[in-house]
């Protein structure tokens, strides 16, 4: 029997961005969306979790339907509409048995993109994480990996999908060579080990190779807990890779949000069985570089709260990485 995992009580910055309410959308857009739905919206309840600078709301319609809507425009963040388009294509191809919100329809006028999904009667995990919800979520991640192996449709590889995000240790190393003081606020251990971190980051595409369809952005705000099932939402990062990769990506956020240390979970998980430790180190190093490197940059338009959240995750990922690279420390 697996030993019970301790759950911490502290949490990091909330996963809450600059959401818009249904009522604040342009009148002409609301009218167009209601025409698309063939019903009026009589109540809209916004969901605050997540970073998209758009609407995320449960809608009650005049014909009695209850659906979930994700609506975003090209302002303030011009990249957001395309993320919704990518997610729509992913959800449309998901197996009917997959624990994901079911896509009902898509509205796209070139400026605004709206995804209308079947409402999931559930909630995001309670934070700090509770032991019961965490255990349910971990089992669901294992089941998701099994269900989506082999991937049910073609997708870019992890390395292809996140190519730009997987070079931030190299970016920081270049900055350090030009001006060592530019990284004065970076953890001293990371500064000393920049060459090793760069080497690990460079092999992440090989380390992540696999046939599983990955979510690649698992966090509590992308998870819904229902009475009898865990659902995984927000799929624009879908890509192909090794089945254990999603767990590595997920665990620093768990620690940041009151859960156990990542190694206590990963080392006990069936997903870690037989995995090359060097591959785990490469993925964890690349993830740490992405989180800490991104946190040093100005926030993207409409995502003013993202950088502190990334930094807090990055600190947890770095703690795990140090432990793996210097086990006798």
Image: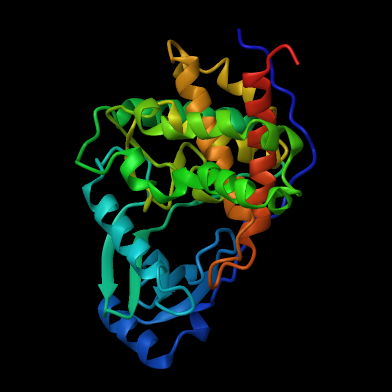
In the image, farthest residue toward the front: 178
Q: How many marks?
A: 0
Up/down of 172 relative to 7, above or below: below
| Residue 320 placement, left or right of 164 | right
x then y, percent, for residue 237: 38, 49
| Residue 189 placement, left or right of 236 | right
x then y, percent, for residue 303: 57, 67
Up/down of 139 relative to 217, above or below: above
Q: Quadrant of the N terminus?
A: top right
Q: Quadrant of the C terminus?
A: top right
Q: Is residue 224 visible?
A: no
**Front-most of residues 88 and 4:** 88
Quarter-of-image position of residue 211: top left
At 59% from the left and 71% from the top, the residue drawn is: 18
Up/down of 115 relative to 264, above or below: below
Q: Is residue 312 visible?
A: yes
**Front-most of residues 194 and 290:** 194
x then y, percent, for residue 328: 73, 11
x then y, percent, for residue 133: 61, 35
């Amino acid at each position: 029997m697996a030993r019970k995992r301790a759950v911490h009580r502290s949490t990091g910055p909330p996963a809450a961005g600059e959401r818009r309410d249904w009522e604040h959308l342009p009148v002409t857009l609301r009218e167009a969306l209601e025409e698309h739905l063939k019903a009026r919206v009589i109540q809209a309840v916004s969901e605050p979790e997540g970073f998209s600078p758009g609407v995320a709301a449960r809608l009650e319609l005049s014909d009695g339907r209850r659906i979930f809507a994700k609506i975003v425009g090209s302002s303030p963040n011009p990249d957001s509409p395309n993320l919704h388009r990518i997610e729509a294509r992913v959800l449309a191809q998901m197996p009917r048995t997959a624990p994901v919100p079911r896509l009902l329809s898509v509205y796209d006028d070139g400026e605004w993109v709206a995804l209308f999904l079947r409402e999931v009667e559930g909630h995001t995990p309670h934070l700090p994480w509770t032991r019961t919800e965490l255990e349910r979520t971990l089992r669901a991640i294992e089941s998701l990996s099994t269900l989506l192996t082999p991937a049910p449709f073609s997708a870019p590889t992890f390395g292809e999908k996140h190519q730009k995000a997987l070079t931030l240790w190299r970016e920081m190393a270049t900055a350090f060579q030009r001006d060592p003081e530019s990284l004065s606020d970076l953890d001293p251990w990371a500064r000393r080990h920049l060459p090793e971190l760069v080497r690990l980051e460079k092999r992440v595409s090989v380390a992540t190779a696999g046939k599983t369809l990955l979510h690649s952005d698992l966090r509590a705000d992308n998870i819904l807990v229902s009475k009898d099932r865990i659902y995984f939402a927000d799929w624009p990062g879908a890509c192909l890779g090794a089945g254990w990769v999603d767990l590595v990506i997920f665990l620093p956020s768990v620690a940041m949000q009151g859960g156990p240390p990542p190694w206590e979970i990963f080392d006990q998980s069936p997903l870690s069985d037989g995995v090359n430790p060097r591959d785990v180190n490469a993925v964890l190093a690349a993830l740490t570089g992405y989180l800490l490197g991104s946190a040093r940059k100005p926030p993207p338009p409409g995502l003013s709260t993202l950088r502190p959240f990334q930094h807090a995750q990055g600190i947890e990922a770095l703690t795990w990485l140090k432990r793996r690279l210097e086990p006798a420390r």
